[in-house]
Amino acid sequence: MTNFGYTLMTEQSGPRELVGYARQAEERGFDFLQISDHYSPWLTEQGHAPYAWSVLGAVAQATERVGLMTYVTCPTMRYHPAVVAQKAATVALLSEGRFTLGLGSGENLNEHVVGRGWPALETRQEMLTEAIEVIRALFDGDLVTYRGEFFDVDSARLWDLPEETVRIAVACAGERAVEAFAPFGDDLIAVEPNGDLVTAWNAQPDASRIGGGSRGAQGGARAIGQIPICWDPSEEAAIERAHREFKWFGGGWDVNADLPTTAGFSSASQFVRPEDVASSIPCGPDLDRIVEAVAKFWEAGFTDVGLVQVGDEGQQRFLDEAAEPLLERLRAAAPA
C-alpha cells in the first residue's frame, strides 16, 4: 500500500500558516507530513524560511494521526549531530512516536550561513556517515563520548527518549550514496522515481539499530519520494505560479546543492521558460495528470510519496477543493 504525504514547504509559507495547513492536511486524509529544513528559500519570490523544528513542535500538538518527518535535515554544518539527536528525540516524544528523522548531506544555500565553508561532495558524505553514528549512539540512551574526524561529543546523554527508537531516513541521489548510507539508515529518501535506487537500498545489509538483517519487503524499509505539483482551477495561473516560484527545480541536484544564494538560483534559472516548468511539474486542474506523474514513484517501488503544492497563494484552495478527490484517485490507482 502506498502512503501519500503533504509537504510543509518552509520556503513558501510562514510558521503559523504551516501549522494550519498541517492540521487541515490531516483532516483531508493525508498519511504523513514532510517538512523542509531551510535557512533560506531558493528564490526571493518564495519569501519565507521559518525554523522547521519549532514548526514541527507545534505541528506535533496540532495533529493526532499523521506521520511527521524532516525532508531533510543536514546534521553536519548548521547543526551539530548531538543537537539533531536531541531535537529528533523531543519531536518523537511530542508526536507520540510519529516522527521519522530524514537526513541528507545538505545544500550550500542553507549550510554556508554559519561560516564554515562548503566541503566537497565526498567530504560531505563522510561527514554525514559520522553524524549518523553520533545520532544513533545518543539514541541508545547511554553516556556518549565520541572523537571523530569531523565531530566530537563530550559526555553527552539524551535524557528524554521515546520508547521506540526514532527511524532514520537518508537522502540518496545515486547508487554511490546508497552504498555509503544504507548500512546506517533505516529508510531511503529520493526525489526522483528511480527504481534502481530502491533496489540497491534494499539489497544492502542493514547495520542500523532498527530491523536488522537484510531489507526488502521483510525488512520493512520505506522508500520515500517527493513530487511538486501546482493544482489550480486555471492551468494558466498554475503555470505562472510554478514558473515564478519553482523555476529553480530543473537545475538538478548537482547544481542545486552547490549554489549559495537566492541570487545564484535566480541567475541559474533565468532562461527557464514557463513551458519548461509545465513540462516537468503537473500544472492546472487535471487530477488524472497528477496521478499519472505520482504513479512513476510507486511503479519504481516507492512506498511513500509526498506532494508539494507549489505556492502559498494556492495552498488553501488546494486543500479545500482538490486534496480529497486527489487522494481518492491516487489510492484507487496505487497497488494495494
Image: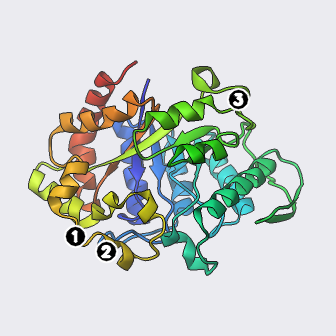
Using the image, determine if residue 49 lies above or below residue 170. Answer: below
Q: How far apart in space, not on screen, are marks 3 and 2 (Cα)?
A: 43 Å
How far apart are the alpha carbons under marks 2 and 1? Answer: 9 Å
Report the Cα–Cα distance between label 1 and label 3: 47 Å
Residue found at x 36% / y 79% = 263
Q: Earlier in the sequence, mark 3 or mark 2?
A: 3
Instruction: Locate the C terminus by quadrant.
Output: top left
Of the image marks 2 and 1, the number of the one nearer the N terminus: 2
Say whether residue 229 is left or right of residue 74: left
Residue at 65% x, 42% y: name it.
185
Say left or right for 53 vs 139.
left
The amino acid beneath tag 3 is Gly
77 shown above or below 326: below
Count residues near mark 3 (Cα–Cα under 10 Å), then give few for <14, some for 14-19, many for 20+. some
Q: Which residue is mark 2?
A: 266
Q: Earlier in the sequence, mark 1 or mark 3?
A: 3
Q: Which residue is mark 3?
A: 211
Q: Is residue 230 visible?
A: no
Here the colouring is: rainbow
User: In front: mark 1 or mark 3?
Assistant: 1
Residue at label 1?
271
Give the total of numbered labels. Answer: 3
Secondary structure beneath dot 1 equals: loop
User: Disc 2 marks which amino acid?
Assistant: Ser
User: Residue 164 location, x and y as percent?
Assistant: 71, 36
Secondary element at image label 2: helix
Do labels 2 and 1 touch, CB within 8 Å? no
